[in-house]
Image (cartoon, grey):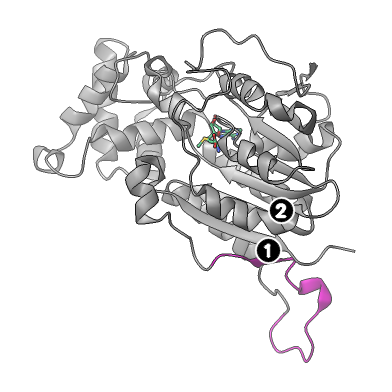
Amino acid sequence: MGTWPGGAGWGPRKKRIDLYASSASKDAKGGLEMQDDVGTGGHVPVMLGRVLELLGPALTGPDPVVVDANLGLGGHSAALLAAHPSLHLIGIDRDPFAIEHSTRRLSPYADRITLVHASSGDLREVLEQVGRPVVNGVLFDLGVSSPQLDEAGRGFAYSYDAPLDMRMDTEQELTAETVVNTYSAAELTRILRVYGEERFAPRVAALIIKERAKEAITSTKRLADIVRDAIPAATRRTGGNPAKRTFQALRIEVNAELSALEAALPAALDALALGGRVVVLSYHSLEDRLTKQALTARTRDTSPPGLPVPLEAHQPRFRLLTRGAELPSEEEVARNPRATSARLRAAERIRVDD
Ligand SMILES: C[S@@+](CC[C@H](N)C(=O)[O-])C[C@H]1O[C@@H](n2cnc3c(N)ncnc32)[C@H](O)[C@@H]1O
């Protein structure tokens, strides 16, 4: 196992990139409860058939390389490795337990994988570190994994009483408890409104400020109760658990999910070889909007209007492979409720820069 702590020459933000030799396993304490060493814990990769179909044509050349930028339980990765016998896979996750689990699960492919504990926001640096700056495919399966949601102790779920944590990377400092107990009313309102699309954001923020003045808010249950009390009774009776939007907002803030995606998407597109493909699965409108913007920007002809011939330098470097966002089938949603909000977009590199 080699470790690069990042830092010098990589700009002001501290970056952490830990690279694992393919067959190495990190001694992470606690973490995923696994049914068996290479098991899936009942996890079903979302829109798997479509992901394989879209990435497949890009992975047929000699020595293809694919990046799974959200390794999780390694479900998509295992299927890609099984489908393409000469494929090398670079798997990235910011959750050390995901790396630990996938190291075991993907051990049958140990000589064809490189697993990296890092944020996909640092994708460019990760690819440089592993010596593969050009790749044939990149998959993003954004958001939280089943074990992150299901493990009470990680504090992602309002349905369990647990410490307010919500860190995907358990080695980072910022937790949901810090956000809830130290951010100003204005900051909390903004986060709840923008990341949670919570229309009662000012009321929820005001009640959080009032309650934390009595005693620090340290548990998911107390926060869920505060949110419930802040929402008008008539609204509370409709539309599921009112804490859902607040928990989503805090999770996105704690893990800087949108800024990571904003950095990762252009880095992924830049890294693609001719014919290389990117597939993005997002789970809420903010992620899908960022994805749509990043892909649209690269698939447009930017020639000034009115020219007699199109300018080569302004021709799009990519083409869209999906019309709008594709959704999972009703059958998949019935089988796997976590696929419900999935939106899939994909693009292919059709030109390289000189
Ligand atoms: C939906 S799960 C991926 C599931 C995976 N495709 C599978 O089949 O098992 C999302 C994973 O992405 C990770 N993640 C989220 N944001 C990340 C980021 N910015 N960088 C790296 N990993 C991230 C989470 O820790 C989680 O394990």
Q: Is residue 67 magenta?
A: no
**Chain part drawn in magenta:** 304-322
Q: Is residue 334 above or below residue 170?
A: below
Q: Is residue 14 visible?
A: no
Q: Give residue 113's position: percent from left, percent from top.
A: 75, 31
Magenta region, main secondary structure = loop
Q: Give residue 77's position: percent from left, percent from top.
A: 63, 38
Please indicate whether residue 296 sits to the left or right of residue 275 in the image. left
Question: Which of the four quarters of the rendered structure image does ligand 1 lie in?
Answer: top right
The answer to whether the residues at label 2 and label 1 have Cβ atoms under 8 Å apart is yes
Answer few, some or many: residues within 10 Å of disc 1's Cα (few below 14, many 20 plus, some between 14 and 19). some
Please indicate whether residue 328 sits to the left or right of residue 10 in the image. left
Which element is circle 2 on?
A: helix
Q: Is residue 310 magenta?
A: yes
Q: Nearer the viewer, residue 158 or 140?
A: 140
Q: Give residue 137's position: percent from left, percent from top.
A: 71, 50
Residue where numbered disc 2 is placed: 269
Q: Residue at x 70, y 74 (%)?
A: 302
Which element is circle 1 on?
A: helix
Q: Residue at x 70, y 23 (%)?
A: 16
Residue where numbered disc 1 is placed: 298
Residue farthest toward the right in the current orientation of the protein: 354
Q: Amino acid at mark 2?
A: Leu
Q: Nearer the viewer, residue 183 or 176?
A: 176
Q: Give residue 133's position: percent from left, percent from top.
A: 83, 43
